[in-house]
Image (cartoon, grey):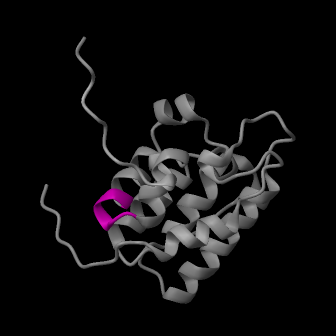
Amino acid sequence: MVSDPPGPRLTNDQRCIAVFILWILSGDAGQRALVAWSMGWQSAQQASGSHWMGPYLAQLLEDPYDAVRFAAYRSLRQLPEFSDTAGPDSKFQYSFVGSSNHRRKARERAIEIWRSAQPAGKERFGKEILVDSRGVLREGAFRQLLEQREDRRMHLNE
């Protein structure tokens, strides 16, 4: 009988948290840009739901890299509560090249919009996306991963 080779050793976070969450919070700029861009794809939103994406894309509105901020805003606008059709009260304006103060306020506003748009129990939440069963973000775990973010300077060629 042939046994399977041992798999990679995973941390507890790697076993319990979705890789998109890990990369968007603690990954390098390339990972953050790829995840942010992918979250705007309709097929990705249909496969995993979009109800949990708001606070993660909002966090990237303050990213040190312009490209990451651009991708995050583009994808955020694809979410129902941030689209132009969401109504005048939900209209969300942002400049990815704006001042750090503008970007901070935009992140705060985006999280506020996301919180107010949470569905009443019809969507699935869980520990793998750091949102509890009531639709509340697990901010302690969120911040802990964010503190581990890889912010070394990098240059990515296409």
- Residue 111 occupies which quadrant of the picture? bottom right
Say above or below: 80 vs 105: above
Q: Position of residue 17 (x, y in %)?
A: 54, 49
**Residue occupying the point 70% across, 50% down:** 81
**Residue occupying the point 17% across, 70% down:** 155
Residue bounds of the magenta highlight? 27-32
Nearer to us in this view, 130 or 51? 130
Quadrant of the image containing the C terminus? bottom left
**Residue occupying the point 61% across, 36% down:** 49
Q: Position of residue 132 (x, y in %)?
A: 76, 50
- Residue 11 occupies which quadrant of the picture? bottom left
Q: Is residue 110 left or right of residue 21?
A: right
Residue 12 among magenta residues: no
Quadrant of the image containing the N terminus? top left
Q: How many marks?
A: 0
Q: Is residue 89 left or right of residue 18?
A: right
Nearer to us in this view, 108 or 150? 150
Say above or below: 33 vs 1: below
Nearer to us in this view, 43 or 148? 148
**Residue occupying the point 70% across, 61% down:** 138
Q: Residue furthest left?
A: 157
Q: Is residue 150 left or right of residue 139?
A: left
